[in-house]
Amino acid sequence: MVNDNLTSVTFFDPVLERIQLVETRMRAISDAHHPDLRAALDHLLTSGGKRIRPAVALLTGEMLGADQEKIITLSAAIELLHTATLVHDDLIDGSFLRRGIPTLNARWTPAATVLTGDYIFACAAKLASETGSVDVMHQFAETLSTIVNGEIKQLFNSRSQDYRLDYMERINAKTASMFVLATSAAALLSPKGDQTLRPVSQYGYGIGMAFQIIDDVLDFTGQQATIGKPVASDLRQGLVTLPTIYYLEEHPDDPDLKIVLTGVNFNNERIDRVIREIQESGAILASVNEAKRFVGQANAALDDLPKSSEKQALVELANYIIDRHR
Amino acid sequence: MVNDNLTSVTFFDPVLERIQLVETRMRAISDAHHPDLRAALDHLLTSGGKRIRPAVALLTGEMLGADQEKIITLSAAIELLHTATLVHDDLIDGSFLRRGIPTLNARWTPAATVLTGDYIFACAAKLASETGSVDVMHQFAETLSTIVNGEIKQLFNSRSQDYRLDYMERINAKTASMFVLATSAAALLSPKGDQTLRPVSQYGYGIGMAFQIIDDVLDFTGQQATIGKPVASDLRQGLVTLPTIYYLEEHPDDPDLKIVLTGVNFNNERIDRVIREIQESGAILASVNEAKRFVGQANAALDDLPKSSEKQALVELANYIIDRHR
């Protein structure tokens, strides 16, 4: 089900009916299974998200004149791929809540969680193959590989001393890659794929980067009740995101932040102080501005494409990503 | 590396060089990664297995005149898919040894194990897409879905009262499906795919079923040192395989077996006695005969295909599956 606060956003209008068809496609994967698995899949697929990736794929496909049926299949495949990575992510992070709702991991054994994720991967791959395009399949597999590689890097803590570079690489792998998939696969399924692949991929990259930056800003500025997890949960787990990076660039010698980053002599008072400092610093606005820059690049990439209501909706969608911050 | 005891088997001769090319393809996935991940992947890919699935795909493809390069890619994809499922399996079962060698799970965190499995899935999917065939991709995704579904069923203990039916369904999902993939995908990549898909799929099904039955027999008859795990480890974990089923059909009232199957009042003395009874009963021979029946069906499915050295090698490979028992 699409969240109510999003159905009122205008860029969803052109694709609202088709998003329901995407939902139906996704739900079909829970048919004819063990009741426990069916319940878990239903829970996962109904509690889930803004369906912003399907909206991007549907709008891009429509803008480029792709076959609607294929784009619906593609959109369901992409959202399932996204869902599968979340299921394994929650297990890996030991997360028990996502968007304030208990994760599969909170209620099931690790074994059941691993297998449910694998099952959703398999369903996503099946749907992707139903688009009938080898190029789409290949891009699909590449994207999964990019996402998993990013997580492995993070797990092994293999980072350079360049926080900003590491961060940009990580959010590209984690988030932007899936938006690039949504736009580029839609282009590959359209009659003018060759000429349009580059601009729409750039658009996907820009909105994906902006989307994750704003998510990371909201982690600092949101209320626990709204974001469904403790404020600054990333930093509390030692994960450095853009607001922290900007703050660090301005205050390279903040002793408490140093301690938080090294994890030695860590205590809650110290981290609470650092979080307050970051919240009240210019780092939040600087991060939002960076997201705006990515959205500007995304929209500019569409400049040379002919005017259409779908193009207009994509521009609005990009702008909405920034508005989420307010 | 191909096991030495297998390189002396004649059916490997026609494909020996190409198996090395398959190995090289598989190894390429560990390039350019974090040293720990690279080491883990190298360990997984070198310690691994008989490469019997690649041999089946290579022989089938060669027999049907498929493009060699594509069949090598397919073979690497199939063996990687198999490897990925093993990595997640070992995590799910909590296995610390496979073929007497420590599993990834024994040395790493569950998180690293999940992600390594996911990464190998992604690499397998990429290679599958490089075959350039949508049909192969689709079959690939279907097979993953079949395997995972089988494991989920097993995990949730959703079984009927019909042990034999449950067992056949389970080993079809777990093992035969991958052999069907190896043969049918090779057919799909060959010029006469349409006419040959059915017989080679039947061949794959037959050898896959026989392969798993003999594995399950070896679990009872092998020495711990040879099979790299305790004798009758399946039954010790409550998993009922064909030798136990035949024994149960002959001795429906064996009180100790009843206790082993229900898991109540379970003790090692009881299970050791049941294992000895099964080992010394006709259940072992009956199981081998069932495997022979599947091999007979497999070879018969190839009857109408023209004579060739590859067809002869496939027949020898099928017969070898039974010989493993001796």
Image (tube, coloured by chain):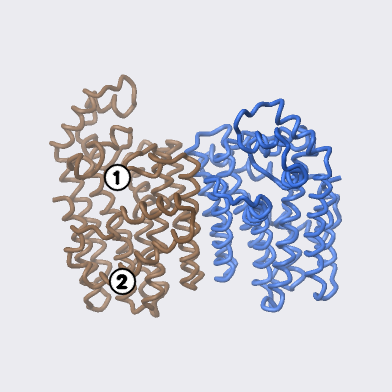
Chain colours: A blue, B brown
Find the distance from the CA under tag 2 to the CA under tag 1: 26 Å
Compared to A304, does B318 lie above or below? above
Q: Quadrant of residue A58?
A: bottom right
Tag 2 residue: B18
- Chain that bears disc 1: B
Q: Residue at x 29, y 24 (%)?
A: B259
Determine contact: label 2, label 1, CB under 8 Å.
no
Tag 1 residue: B101
**Mark 1: few/some/many CA within 10 Å (<14, 14-19, 20+):** some
Determine whether the residue tagged by mark 2 lies in a helix, strand or loop: helix
Q: Where residue A240 sits in the image (x, y, percent)?
A: 67, 43
Instruction: Identify which amino acid the numbered label 1 is placed on.
Output: Ile
Q: Mark 2 and mark 1, same subunit? A: yes
Q: Residue at x 31, y 53 (%)?
A: B47
Q: Where residue A104 sits in the image (x, y, percent)?
A: 58, 37
Looking at the image, tell me whether mark 2 or mark 1 is earlier in sequence order: 2
Q: Where residue A173 sits in the image (x, y, percent)?
A: 62, 56
Q: Nearer the viewer, residue A81 or B191?
A: A81
- Chain that bears disc 2: B
Q: Is residue B143 left or right of residue A90?
A: left
**Mark 2: few/some/many CA within 10 Å (<14, 14-19, 20+):** many
Which mark, residue A323? Answer: none
Instruction: Identify which amino acid the numbered label 2 is placed on.
Output: Arg
Residue extending farthest top: B265
Q: Is residue B96 left or right of residue B304?
A: right
Q: Is residue B307 left or right of residue A189?
A: left
Q: Where residue A186 sits in the image (x, y, percent)?
A: 68, 67
